[in-house]
Image: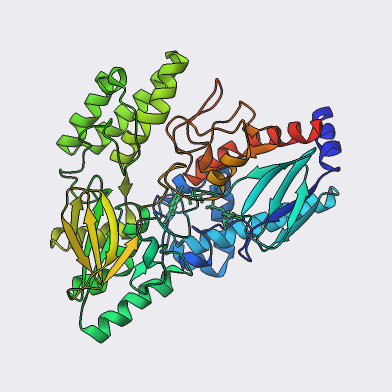
Amino acid sequence: MAQRRTEADVLSRVALTVFEPSDELGTGVTYGPKSGDRTLTITPMREVLPSGVLGDFGAWLTRSPERGLLGETSGAEVDPVGARYLPRRVVGRFLKERVARAVAALGKMGVAVEHRRKAILKVRPAAGGVRVFDGAAYAEFDAVVLMNGTPKSPHGSGLADSLQASDHYISDLYSPGIDQNVNRILSRCRRAGGTTVVAIGTNASSVEAGYLLADAIQSGLVRFHAVSASGRWPAILGAKCRPPFGVSDVAQPTSGMALRRRPLLTQDERVRSVHACLARGDLDAALEVYRSIATALDGASHQARDDAINFVLPAVVDAIRRVGGPYAERLSVLSDCGLLRTTAGVVESISGSRDGYPLLLRLEDGSGIEADFVIDAAGWGGMRRNNNLAAELLSAFEKMEVSPGGRGLRVSPDFMAEERILVFGPLLAGMNTAEHRLWHLESTANIYRLADPVASAFVKLVATL
Ligand SMILES: Cc1cc2nc3c(=O)[nH]c(=O)nc-3n(C[C@H](O)[C@H](O)[C@H](O)COP(=O)(O)OP(=O)(O)OC[C@H]3O[C@@H](n4cnc5c(N)ncnc54)[C@H](O)[C@@H]3O)c2cc1C
């Protein structure tokens, strides 16, 4: 009670300014309007929201006009909400209402919240504070909480700088929105009687593009080809998992990122067993081994944990990616018909092509792939590859560092990357403290779970200002 009063006292001195270019607070790109109405959660709802919040979501859904999504649920069905893959916009509507309620509650505590519909382009140290630049003006604050997700650079992976204005190069599938981009491909396809789409990446965004284009792919109008370092789609749950979907060598550098070789850990028996399970197509066994590596961190030295968190576990997570529900149903049909073509390779450049196709992708091995459209779905290449706000900060703040694996910022046990800069969300990847070991913070449920410790760190920070 006394602690809660102290927190309330501290918070009553706070005014929050949220810089968010979208009109919606709390939905981000994944659950916001840019994701359209047809995209689904990639994981079942029980992996999207932690159990307490999932219960609230279920209750909200049964009251909402979208309750039909639950279908006829008989009393025998144990987990009617948690087992489903639901439209992400529905989850977004729920999150938006929760955030609005939280903002109202803060208002009652005397905490003003202002939403500025602007993106921050720069953050700079200032005497006794921090200055932020929104493209038009600087504003000064006491502290900044960096929670800009895993933002891609507006120039995609930077492979096609000269093609930014090309109608054929989609540097970000969600900008201005996934539906606009898919419709652009389909209308060209109708005009030309067919089109070739090459996606860079075989992860979530590529899966979404394949799903939304599935009818046109199945009818042969769209030829869909994905290129990634692994050349593997996520394991399609429900369908028979068959090779190749294993990793060949976790220590291999991917996407040009110079990963250090760690013989000690890459030769680790457990990592080798993951490879063996994956080669057999036994995803459940691979997941079990993954969990055992995560558990083994407890007894490991700080250095061994740093290596496992930054290099081994991310590679294993990548290897055991899964996709289920309606995505799996559609993609497995396409896959079985040989219509989901993949190539393992690293794209080096994308340029305009003179012969027939508008675009030409050059791979590191010297081969080329021609395309009518390129979707840059390479995702988050980490701090060193993507030109984004968090990377921009590094040049301005002396003590700020990238976490060893390059996917996030190095933070203190209080989630601080610098004196007045607190970090939350996927940029915490690589955090290695006694309490928090994070090789991956992209699952929404895990982000939720970490909200309380980050909020406490925020109150602690404010109390010192
Ligand atoms: C296609 C796709 C499907 C996914 N499916 C699932 C799933 O099924 N289950 C699951 O658990 N996770 C899923 N994820 C991952 C998960 O949704 C994200 O990791 C999570 O939303 C991250 O939350 P966040 O609040 O940290 O960042 P985000 O939700 O990305 O929000 C970041 C916000 O910061 C804003 N922003 C960015 N840069 C700036 C700037 N410079 N200035 C001001 N504002 C800025 C953005 O506009 C955005 O609103 C998926 C991700 C993708 C891309």
Considering the image in quadrants, where does the N terminus appear? top right
Relative depth, front residue between 52 and 376: 376
The answer to which quarter of the image holds residue 142 is top right
Q: Position of residue 419 (x, y in %)?
A: 69, 32
Q: Position of residue 223 (x, y in %)?
A: 20, 69
Vertical position of residue 385 compared to residue 38: above or below: above
Asked whether, in this view, residue 452 is left or right of residue 224, the answer is right
Q: How is the image coloured?
A: rainbow
- Disc tally is 0
Residue at image location 15% in from the left, 44% down from the top: 242
Residue that protrudes farthest toward the bottom in the picture: 191
Relative depth, front residue between 348 and 74: 348
Asked whether, in this view, residue 13 is left or right of residue 243, the answer is right
Vertical position of residue 186 compared to residue 456: above or below: below
The answer to which quarter of the image holds residue 257 is top left
Residue that protrudes farthest toward the left in the picture: 337
Relative depth, front residue between 303 and 450: 303
Vertical position of residue 76 compared to residue 209: above or below: above
Residue at image location 47% in from the left, 55% down from the top: 153
Q: Position of residue 21 (x, y in %)?
A: 62, 62
Q: Position of residue 127 (x, y in %)?
A: 79, 39
Residue at image location 33% in from the left, 51% down from the top: 203
Residue at image location 86% in from the left, 42% down from the top: 13
Vertical position of residue 270 compared to residue 222: above or below: above
The answer to which quarter of the image holds residue 227 is bottom left
Considering the image in quadrants, where does the C terminus appear? top right
